[in-house]
Image (cartoon, rainbow, N blue to C red):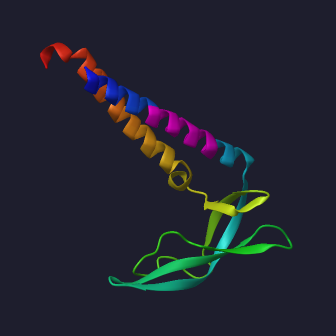
Amino acid sequence: MIICILFIVIGAVVLAFALVAFRHATTFVKKGRCVEGAVIKFVETKDEDGVYYYPLFEITISEKETITYRGMNGATYKSWKIGQKAAFIYVPGEVPHIRRLRYWSIFGFPLVLLAIAADFIVVGFGYFLLKAYF
């Protein structure tokens, strides 16, 4: 009986964190402004596994302000081309907090938390409903 309550409580707590993270993501998208950035060069980093290439984007925020953004995903080959463009989103006034405009980069963390919470809740209620068999 304790194990089912424990699973349900853990699932509820993780679900609460997932909902808060989802709310932050939707607020970010609602308040955000879309801009376009272009690859200007590649940043090479060496590791024991080899050389990784990270794209460096130049993003024009306004007529007077441009920023550079290093891509978060590196590859062993240059997966981008110089001059290739990508969409970004940021909240005006919070320029350091900029993200690529992709579904997974914005809503990925809340979705992972939601999946973990659903697993805990389903297992907890499964134990609770089928406790006569255990």
Foreground of the two, 74 or 118:
118
Whether 104 is drawn above or below 46: the answer is above
Q: Main secondary structure of the magenta part?
A: helix
Q: Position of residue 101 (x, y in %)?
A: 61, 57
Residue lying furthest left in this view?
Answer: 133
Whether 129 is drawn above or below 112: the answer is above
Residue lying furthest top in this view?
Answer: 132
Question: Relative to 38, is 113 on the left or the right?
Answer: left
Q: Position of residue 86 (x, y in %)?
A: 61, 67
Q: Quadrant of residue 66?
A: bottom right
Quadrant housing the C terminus:
top left
Which residue is depicted at the point 64% across and 63% down? 87
Whether 74 is drawn above or below 114: the answer is below
Foreground of the two, 56 or 120:
120
Quadrant housing the N terminus:
top left
Foreground of the two, 133 or 99:
133
Does the magenta portion include 20? yes
Whether 84 is drawn above or below 125: the answer is below
Which residue is depicted at the point 66% across and 62% down? 98
Does the magenta portion include 27? no
Which residue is depicted at the point 83% across and 67% down? 62
Q: Quadrant of residue 35?
A: bottom right
Question: Relative to 107, is 126 on the left or the right?
Answer: left
Residue lying furthest front in this view?
Answer: 2
Question: Which segment did they paint magenta?
Answer: 13-25
Which residue is depicted at the point 57% across and 38% down? 20
Q: Position of residue 96 (x, y in %)?
A: 69, 65
Q: Quadrant of residue 11?
A: top left
